[in-house]
């Protein structure tokens, strides 16, 4: 503990007050203290510094210690002052003092303030050590690891990330400060946008880098962090090759099994139709049993193939915007003949909110079909199946409830595992026992979760939840997409395409008009050609990035040579344009477009003509 005061009486008093718990050195001149620090002396825990001293004042000592030339920039400073005016106290704290104490002071208060500064310094050192330890851990993680801010810009990258992703960069520099979409345009972060902060790791579709395959996972961080998303990418090239070989083997086995099974079914059907003459009732009964067992074997083969495709992390599936409410309605319609034949009724109301998710439409239909089929199997005649689509904490929840016998408590924990079934002795049903496991695999591959509520005699409710795709707030106008290109035909084609996807479009024929459109319309994204008269795309991108009001605008650059493009562009697309890449870019940066309400019958407009040469997707 160092005390600096030109008054021998004040210095002696401070020495007495602190001498018990601390070892105190007393100085009477600010310049002597600075020389001592510059000479390499071990630093004190706290510097108790008088403001008013001849020669070098306490305020000047503060300023020097907080300057770039300081030998001890983090030294804790308690400023002793006879000043009581607010402006003077502000000057002292602005000069770098951590705290101040007005003279005359009580000894107990001096000790308390010194103790507080020491505790604060210890906490700061502890945080610094922890941060450094975490950085060393992250640097040695055997995966590509990076963090993103809310704009999708990389804020941290470990050594493996720099090594693996640097070849993907356009232009000089490292990863930090670059948009992730520029480096990894195939990285689909749409699932992460709908996830809650602190949620479990979300598996994302595989990404190919050169000849290597990486499996990304992401976690959404709380909004008060500088980074909002952390992404880890593991090299799974060998695993994927092994999975491909296994799937090939399963496919061959399935094909070889299906052929004889299909032949058996055809022959059984031929016999039942009387092609070999009349059969005794007992023989017909046996043939029916054989036919049912063969169909069960076919279903088992199909389920095994599904699991081979879904298990592990190899499954990526399609990524499109899916309306869950519409998907439920379609699934019920498809199963309506079976529902009617079983003597059941179904209750379902179209949800009154945007129940949109991002995922594989075919696989999600399979989830709904499996859950509805199970409900039909285990609900007695005259029963009711209720399907609800609800919003729950940023997720879309689908619940399928039946009025069956319910499930025993000891079966529930393992119900989504392989071959586990809720057996009802009074109502035997066919099946492989793999349906619920397939449901779980599909939903978890979409970043969701599954579960069941049930009790004997009270029916069962199976549910699954998935991240809801971000939607425009109620009453919020959709910001347009800006297209800048001197080619009128290309502008019209892009307008037709994007308006068909639900986006509002603003056009400009050169960069100068594009800048005015940025100011007037505040677009959510811009699609910019590089070669244009008046102001080309290079200058447009540079002007936008230097303007603090529009600097974060997502910009997709269209270039004849992909490597020849501004490094600050969010995405570079080489002509001819990959439309799916452009749409993925807009969904990632602009979010999905809210569905327009259907027009009134008297206001319905004729279908818009499609420009020649545009292939619909």
Image (cartoon, helix red, strand yellow):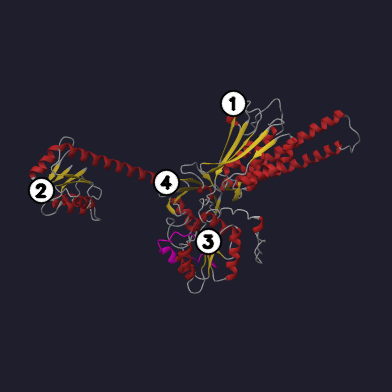
Instruction: Categorize mark 2 by other alpha carbons within 10 Å: few (<14), some (14-19), many (20+).
Output: many
Task: Read off the residue under disc 4.
Answer: 138
Task: Read off the residue under disc 3.
Answer: 481
Instruction: Categorize mark 1 by other alpha carbons within 10 Å: few (<14), some (14-19), many (20+).
Output: few
- Residue 311 visible from this viewpoint: no
| Cα distance between the residues tagged 4 and 1 | 42 Å
SS for callout 4: helix
Q: Which residues are magenta?
A: 542-565
The mark total stands at 4
- 513 versus 47 height, above or below: below
Quadrant position of the C terminus in the picture: bottom right
| Cα distance between the residues tagged 2 and 4 | 50 Å
- Residue 7 visible from this viewpoint: yes
Task: Read off the residue under disc 1.
Answer: 410
Determine which quarter of the picture holds residue 2. Answer: top left
Between label 3 and label 4, give the one nearer the viewer.
3
Q: Residue at x 67, y 37 (%)?
A: 346
| Cα distance between the residues tagged 1 and 3 | 55 Å
Residue 601 x, y percent position in the rendering? 66, 55
The circle on residue 86 is none
Query: Going by the picture, which residue comes out furthest to the bottom?
Result: 534
Front position in the image: 582 or 39: 582
| Cα distance between the residues tagged 2 and 3 | 68 Å
SS for callout 2: loop
Task: Read off the residue under disc 2.
Answer: 6
Sequence-earlier tag: 2 or 4: 2
Sequence-earlier tag: 2 or 1: 2
Q: Residue at x 48, y 42 (%)?
A: 199
């Amino acid at each position: 503990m160092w005390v600096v005061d030109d008054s021998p009486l004040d210095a002696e008093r401070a020495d007495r007050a602190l001498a018990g718990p601390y070892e105190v050195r007393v100085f009477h001149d600010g310049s002597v203290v600075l020389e001592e620090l510059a000479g390499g002396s071990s630093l004190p825990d706290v510097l108790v510094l008088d403001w008013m001293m001849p020669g070098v004042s306490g305020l000047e000592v503060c300023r020097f210690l907080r300057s770039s030339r300081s030998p001890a920039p983090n030294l804790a400073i308690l400023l002793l002052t006879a000043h009581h005016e607010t402006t003077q106290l502000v000057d002292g704290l602005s000069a770098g003092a951590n705290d101040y104490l007005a003279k005359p002071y009580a000894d107990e208060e001096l000790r308390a303030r010194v103790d507080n500064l020491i505790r604060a310094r210890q906490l700061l050192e502890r945080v610094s050590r922890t941060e450094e330890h975490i950085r060393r851990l992250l640097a040695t993680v055997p995966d590509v690891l990076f963090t993103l801010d809310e704009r999708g810009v990389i804020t941290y990258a470990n050594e493996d990330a720099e090594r693996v992703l640097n070849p993907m960069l356009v232009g000089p520099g490292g990863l930090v400060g670059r948009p992730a979409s520029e480096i990894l345009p195939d990285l689909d972060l749409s699932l992460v946008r709908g996830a809650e902060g602190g949620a479990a790791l979300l598996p994302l579709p595989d990404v190919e880098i050169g000849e290597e395959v990486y499996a990304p996972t992401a976690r959404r961080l709380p909004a008060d962090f500088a980074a909002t998303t952390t992404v880890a990418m593991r090299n799974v090239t060998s695993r994927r090759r092994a999975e491909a070989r296994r799937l090939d083997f399963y496919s061959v086995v399935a094909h070889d099994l299906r052929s004889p099974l299909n032949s058996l079914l055809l022959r059984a059907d031929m016999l039942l139709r009387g092609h070999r003459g009349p059969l005794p009732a007992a023989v017909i009964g046996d043939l029916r049993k054989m036919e049912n067992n063969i169909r069960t074997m076919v279903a088992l083969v199909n389920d095994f193939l599904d699991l081979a495709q879904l298990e592990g992390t190899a499954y990526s599936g399609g990524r499109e915007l899916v309306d869950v409410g519409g998907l439920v309605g379609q699934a019920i319609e498809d199963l309506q003949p079976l529902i009617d034949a079983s003597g059941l009724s179904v209750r379902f109301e179209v949800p009154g909110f945007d129940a949109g998710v991002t995922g594989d439409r075919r696989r999600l239909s399979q989830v709904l079909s499996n859950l509805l089929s199970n409900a039909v199997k285990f609900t007695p005649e005259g029963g009711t199946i209720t399907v609800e689509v609800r919003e729950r904490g940023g997720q879309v929840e689908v619940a399928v409830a039946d009025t069956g016998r319910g499930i025993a408590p000891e079966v529930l924990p393992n119900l989504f595992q392989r071959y586990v079934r809720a057996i009802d002795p009074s109502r035997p049903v066919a099946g492989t026992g793999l349906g619920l496991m397939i449901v779980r695999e599909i939903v978890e591959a979409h970043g969701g979760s599954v579960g069941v509520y049930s009790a004997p005699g009270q029916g069962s409710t199976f549910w699954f939840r998935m991240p809801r795709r971000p939607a425009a707030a109620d009453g919020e106008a959709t910001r347009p997409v800006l297209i800048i290109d001197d080619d009128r035909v290309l502008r019209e084609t892009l307008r037709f395409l994007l308006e068909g996807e639900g986006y509002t479009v603003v056009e400009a024929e050169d960069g100068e008009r594009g800048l005015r459109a940025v100011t007037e319309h505040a677009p959510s994204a811009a699609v910019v050609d590089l070669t244009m008269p008046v102001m080309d795309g290079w200058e447009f991108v540079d002007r936008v990035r230097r303007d603090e009001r529009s600097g974060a605008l997502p910009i997709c650059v269209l270039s004849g040579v992909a490597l020849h493009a501004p490094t600050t562009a969010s995405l570079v697309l080489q002509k001819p344009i990959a439309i799916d890449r452009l749409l993925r870019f807009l969904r990632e940066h602009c979010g999905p477009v809210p569905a327009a309400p259907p027009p009134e019958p008297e206001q319905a407009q004729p279908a818009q003509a499609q420009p020649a040469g545009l292939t619909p997707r």
